[in-house]
Image (cartoon, grey):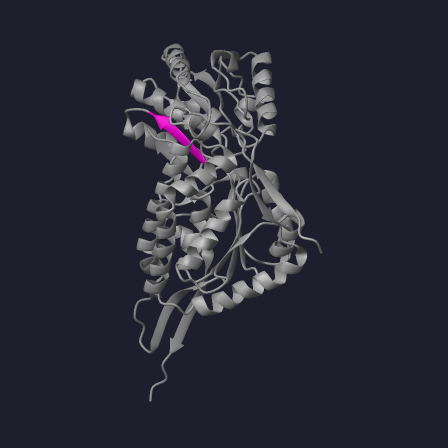
Amino acid sequence: MKRDELTVTNPYSGEMVCRVPLMDEGEVNPMVQQARAAFREWRAAPPAERGALCRKAMEFFGERRDAIALDITQQMGKPLRQAIGEVNRMLERAEYLIDIAEKTLADEWLPELAGFKRYIRHEPMGVVLDIAAWNYPLLIAVNVIVPAVLAGNAVLVKHSRRTPLCGTAFEDAYRAAGAPDGLVQAVTADHEVVEKLIRHPGVDYVSFTGSVRGGRELTYSVAGRFIPIGLELGGKDPAYVCADAPFDFAVENCVDGAFYNAGQSCCAIERIYVDQNIYDDFVEAYVRKTSEYALGDPCERTTTLGPLAQDSARQFLGRQVEEAVSSGGRCLISAADFEMPARGFFFAPTVVADAPQTCSLMQEESFGPAIGIRAVSDDDEAISLMNDSRYGLTASIWTSDLGRAIRIGEQIDTGTFYMNRCDYLDPALPWCGVKDTGRGCSLSHYGFLPLTRLKSMHLREVPG
């Protein structure tokens, strides 16, 4: 069967970034078998050796920081400064996971019982398939790859068709670090080949970051196999700005939380509810801060908002804004207020005040630089509207009252609740969601658990 190629073009310039061969169906079984052979060798490695390997792999990224960041920018349009920041944050996150791995994965001994030895082991799953997304191509992938390897697994990295070079970078990093052949392998394949990978009996766990539709398809694909899956399917994350919020701080961070990475973040702020007593002042300040964005070549230091990764997203965002305005919203800033680049998949930061709760802009994930804002009369209304969503990844409150934040946070259906923060993953806390956001978790010591099997060791000593 002839091998086809995947061609990636720069969303700013339109120029070709790379051509990568696509796997064919005949390569699936050899790849999985190589991964299983690597797993059988690697599972016996002591914790210190696993940690050392992962540190050396991360050194590969550190030594090539600028080149890898440029690859990200050219593949999906993220401003280069932000791409360099992503490399740095990935290294910090990986270091934390390496530091906690040995203690997290250690045998758990039960209290002494005369005549018995009892303990619980965390054994590796085997071969982990990580299907990663393009918007944070290093940070999303590292959440699975590093803890999976630390736990003794082999990993197949199926990166997005938009960012295949990032998957290749992980394979190269572990090979350069001295990993067993096949321990971490990059997969570049079409839907049909990936489906065969998912269904292959040698694959023991699948992690997927992407759309709700993709999550449903994956769930159907593993039906009958009885293997666990992890799903992170995005969000429509709300922010609630209270009257006692640190005003300027809240404005600045809610703008950044909505428009950083051109809003292409599953945990970006996507809808804002503001106490009616400060609503007009907040909206005015929010629009003024939004107007400071500079759109342009993502490789230029002056650019603060790059192009969208995909042209089709512009049409979707345009329809969301049009619907919000036609149903009563007020568009206060949009493309007419910016110097728009002559090329690239750009969508200007767009703010719609008085956005109706029922419109798509307030209900369906935008995944781009468009935000709806509306006033609320009190905490109870804010809680009701924040929970009025089929998603539940993150939510934030902006207030000076810690007790209020705790009281409200405990009533919000979400995986992570922030006070005076947003759009940030703390590696010490589990990253998880509810409702259509998905199931399972990554990061923290809990993130290791889906990548391992529990084994109960129940040993009885017979008296001599």
Left or right relative to 173: residue 95: left
Q: Position of residue 68 (x, y in %)?
A: 43, 43
List the single residue furthest toward the bottom: 464
Which quarter of the rendering shows the N terminus? Answer: bottom right
Relative to residue 257, is residue 50 depicted above or below?
Answer: below
Predominant SS of the magenta segment: strand
Image quadrant containing the C terminus? bottom left
Which residue is most to the front? 15
Residue 421 lies, with reference to residue 123, above or below; the image says above
Q: Position of residue 136 (x, y in %)?
A: 46, 39
Residue 393: say if magenta: yes
Which span is picked out in magenta? 392-398
- Can residue 226 be seen by looking at this rendering? yes
Residue 308 lies left or right of residue 85; in this view the side is: right
Residue drawn 61% across the image and 48% down it: 218
Percent coordinates x, y for residue 460 in the rendering: 38, 78
Above or below — where is 80 with respect to 440?
Answer: above
Q: Which residue is painted at 37% across and 84% down in the image?
A: 462
Q: Is residue 263 magenta?
A: no
Q: Viewed as shown, does residue 336 lie left or right of 63?
A: right
Is residue 263 or residue 374 the one in the foreground? 263
Viewer-nearest residue: 214 or 299:
299
Quadrant assignment, res 261:
top left
Q: Residue at x 50, y 62 (%)?
A: 182
